Image: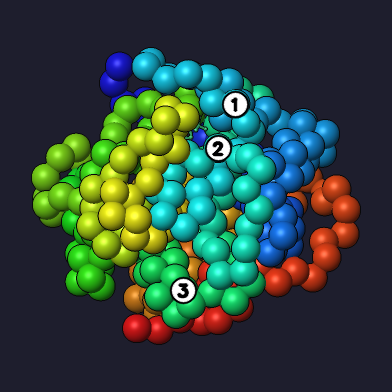
């Protein structure tokens, strides 16, 4: 199946789905604190999606070829877990890092986004990994424009990751997204500039690098889903759903709680971001309950970063 160029109506549907997915992360952020179980995070997100947003949690019972149905509504990947962690009885402890990956379906369209959360007080190595992985994602996104290639995106991500002493997971990648959860093309998070598919206005795909503090090799757990680093080193991931526009890109999974975008932008980048921010602010759904002031911090939400 070829790469789908979205129509203006489809793009409008994807904007709504993308914003809703990001708003689930805004909603859950204050609950991500020492003592909470990943099952509780799943239950809260499920209720928010179904009852407040009237959206469908795409992971629940998702069963791509060769996989058993995913049993929960979100993915929670803790510490050396790379992706697809299944929420369960595990309780988050001070110093853990956790990726929460949300995919909602609204009016038939998918919005897919994830963030890293620091649980309580984290060590400097964990913070640096989360922050640099966030920058890796944005390095990839800022390459997106008509005529750029998939290799440009992958190379930008790989360059920052490896120059920081980290490795890029090869077995999982970003993906086209729309009426289906996973569409063509595959978005590799490594590669060579100027190679691969040329981007065209109207394409929508995710950029979701998985970056390991140690070696890049991974292993799948016996549950058939959870991916961990083979060497047990920490792993981080961030994800946005991105539309290719005539001007460059529009990030569809931004919301009021999205962490600040890293790096001093050049002039043309600043213009692009102005478009994104203008598209983002109004909430589609209202919160379930007033958010408590939490200990968990989204990386980048408070501290401007430099390197
Ligand atoms: N949200 C993941 C992605 O970014 C996919 C999760 S599949 C699931 O592509 F079944 F584990 F939810
Ligand atoms: Co994805
Ligand atoms: Co995802």
Q: Circle 1 sits on which residue?
A: 71
Frontmost residue, 182 versus 42: 42
Indicate whether 183 appears above or below 167: above
Is residue 290 rendered to the left or right of residue 146? right
Earlier in the chain: of badge 2 and badge 1, it is 1
Q: Position of residue 111 (x, y in %)?
A: 55, 38
Task: Report how far apart the C-alphas of labels 3 and 1 lie in the structure.
Answer: 30 Å
Q: Position of residue 178 (x, y in %)?
A: 48, 29
Indicate whether 2 appears above or below 130: above
Task: Name the residue at 40% across, 84% down.
Answer: 306
Q: Secondary structure at mark 3?
A: helix
Q: Position of residue 131 (x, y in %)?
A: 43, 70
Task: Specify the quadrant that holds the C terminus.
Answer: bottom left
Indicate whether 23 appears above or below 278: above
Tell me if mark 2 has few (under 14), some (14-19) or many (20+) residues whose alpha carbon lies within 10 angstroms of its own.
many
Q: Which mark is residue 86?
A: 2
Task: Specify the quadrant that holds the N terminus.
Answer: top left
């Amino acid at each position: 199946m070829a790469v789908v160029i979205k129509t203006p109506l489809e793009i409008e549907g994807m904007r709504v789905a993308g914003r809703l997915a990001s708003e689930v992360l805004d909603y859950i952020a204050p609950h991500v604190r020492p003592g909470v179980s990943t099952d509780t995070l799943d239950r809260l997100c499920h209720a928010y999606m179904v009852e407040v947003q009237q959206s469908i949690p795409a992971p629940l019972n998702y069963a791509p070829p060769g996989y058993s149905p995913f049993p929960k509504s979100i993915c929670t990947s803790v510490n050396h877990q790379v992706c697809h962690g299944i929420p369960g009885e595990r309780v988050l402890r001070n110093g853990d890092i956790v990726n929460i990956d949300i995919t909602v379906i609204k009016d038939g369209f998918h919005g897919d986004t994830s963030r890293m959360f620091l649980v309580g007080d984290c060590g400097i190595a964990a913070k640096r990994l989360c922050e640099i992985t966030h920058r890796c994602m944005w390095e990839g996104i800022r390459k997106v424009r008509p005529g750029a290639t998939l290799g440009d995106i992958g190379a930008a991500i790989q360059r920052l990751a490896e120059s920081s002493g980290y490795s890029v997971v090869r077995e999982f990648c970003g993906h086209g997204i729309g009426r289906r959860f996973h569409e063509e093309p595959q978005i590799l998070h490594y590669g060579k500039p100027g190679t691969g598919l040329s981007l065209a206005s109207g394409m929508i795909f995710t950029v979701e690098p998985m970056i390991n503090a140690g070696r890049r090799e991974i292993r799948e757990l016996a549950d058939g889903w959870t991916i961990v680093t083979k060497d047990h080193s920490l792993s981080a991931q961030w994800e946005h759903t991105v539309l290719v526009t005539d001007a460059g890109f529009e990030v569809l999974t931004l919301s009021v709680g999205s962490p600040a975008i890293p790096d001093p932008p050049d002039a043309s980048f600043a213009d692009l971001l102005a478009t994104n921010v203008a598209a983002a602010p109004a909430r589609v759904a209202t919160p379930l309950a007033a958010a408590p002031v939490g200990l968990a911090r989204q990386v980048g939400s408070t501290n401007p970063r430099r390197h």
